Amino acid sequence: MSEMNEFDEDVPEIVKRFMYVNRRAPYGTIYALECLEVVLIAAAFDQDVSVVFLDDGVCQLKKNQDTTGIGMKNFSKTYGALDDYDVEKIYVEKESLDARGLTAGDLVIPVEVMAADELREVMAQQDVIISS
Amino acid sequence: MKFAVLINEGPFTHQASDSAYRFTAAALAKGHEIYRVFFYNDGVYNSNRLSEPQTDDRNLVSLWSRLGRDHDIDLVVCVAAALRRGIKDEVLENGFRISGLGQLVEAGIQADRLIVFGD
Amino acid sequence: MLHLVNKSPFERNALDSCLRMAKSGSAILLIEDGVYAALAKSAHAEKIIGRMGDFSFYVLGPDVAARGLSDAPLIEGIDIVDYEGFVDMVAEHDATQSWL
């Protein structure tokens, strides 16, 4: 087989590192919900997906959300589906949690809490960063 | 180089679509390829042909449509975000098409660079 | 990596988060209302001046001009680029992060 043929037939699947960055609190704006919708779709593609929560984004994961009084859908339960979709790299910035008086125990799903120093390195390795 | 552009805001409240338009036009002028422009969140309003800005103002809906036609750019409006906001084929400006969020992820995979404009 | 900041430092924390999370050696481009962070006499100027050694800072000229700031002194060392320069910067860096 010539090199040319081998190249034509064996096109490698592109795998990129996609990072979804959440910096907004839920409900006040739609960004948190619509970003979650993107991540759930993105999970179907065979890419290296990570989801980051920092600044007010960490509030999206706060336990005990009850939206009955505001009439909006409580989508905090949907974060639990990320694991079912094999989205395993879920990072929460420690400084953002600390600044809001929260800890990992206050969150609806298990996450990897990372200091800014460490998260900075992970961010710098990404191919595509989708933020909202 | 192949660029993909994500626009998360509509044509009036935020500058995002203006910035994205100028960026896209400049990239084309420099000989780059625009793989796709994807409209998400309120960005879907950029495709509403019923919008009528005042005559002395720029009209981003027509500007995007014209840029898309002149350079054969794939202008994709997210179906989930669009339905919520009443953007359907009946009101879609020429050159835009409605499709799924997978088109955004695919653009991220296929393009060399993806750049986000939003609020 | 290239970082884009489009928010005024007087209104939002996008610049602060960018400066906290960006890796040394990154380029930071101020666009839209982000250009107010480039003003030499602003109350936030020290944030950028103090990090000049870590990052290269740029500001989008058309956004500066639109806001009547062409005659205002900008922080020394911030380079002004146009949309062509903006495109070049996105092409030159492997990835772009928008601090919305």
Image (spheres, rainbow, N blue to C red):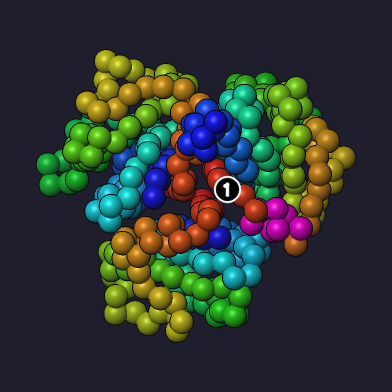
Secondary structure beneath disc 1? Answer: loop
Q: Residue at x 31, y 62 (%)?
A: C84
**Left or right of residue B75, residue A116 in this image:** right
Query: Depth check: A42 or C5 in front?
Result: A42
Amino acid on which disc 1 is placed: Asp
Residue placed under numbered mark 1 in the picture: A127
In this view, the residue farthest toward the front is A1
**Can residue A11 be seen from the camera position used here?**
no
Question: Which chain does tag 1 point to?
Answer: A
Q: Is residue C66 above or below residue A21?
A: below
How far across and how far down the image is residue C91, in percent?
A: 43, 57
Quadrant where the N terminus of chain C sits is bottom right
Q: Is residue B32 above or below residue A41?
A: below
Q: Quadrant of residue A108?
A: top right
Residue A120 drawn in magenta: yes
Q: Residue at x 33, y 32 (%)?
A: B75
Q: Residue at x 62, y 59 (%)?
A: C17
In this view, the residue farthest toward the right is A105
How far across and how far down the image is residue C33, in percent?
A: 41, 60
Query: Depth check: B82 or C41 in front?
Result: B82
How far across and how far down the image is residue B117, in percent?
A: 43, 47
Q: Quadrant of residue A14?
A: top right
Residue C90 drawn in magenta: no
How far across and how far down the image is residue A73, in percent?
A: 62, 22
Near mark 1 (Cα within 10 A), the count class, few <14, some 14-19 or many ≥20, is: many
Q: Which residues are magenta?
A: A118-124
In this view, the residue farthest toward the top is B90
Q: Main secondary structure of the magenta part?
A: helix
Count numbered badges in the picture: 1
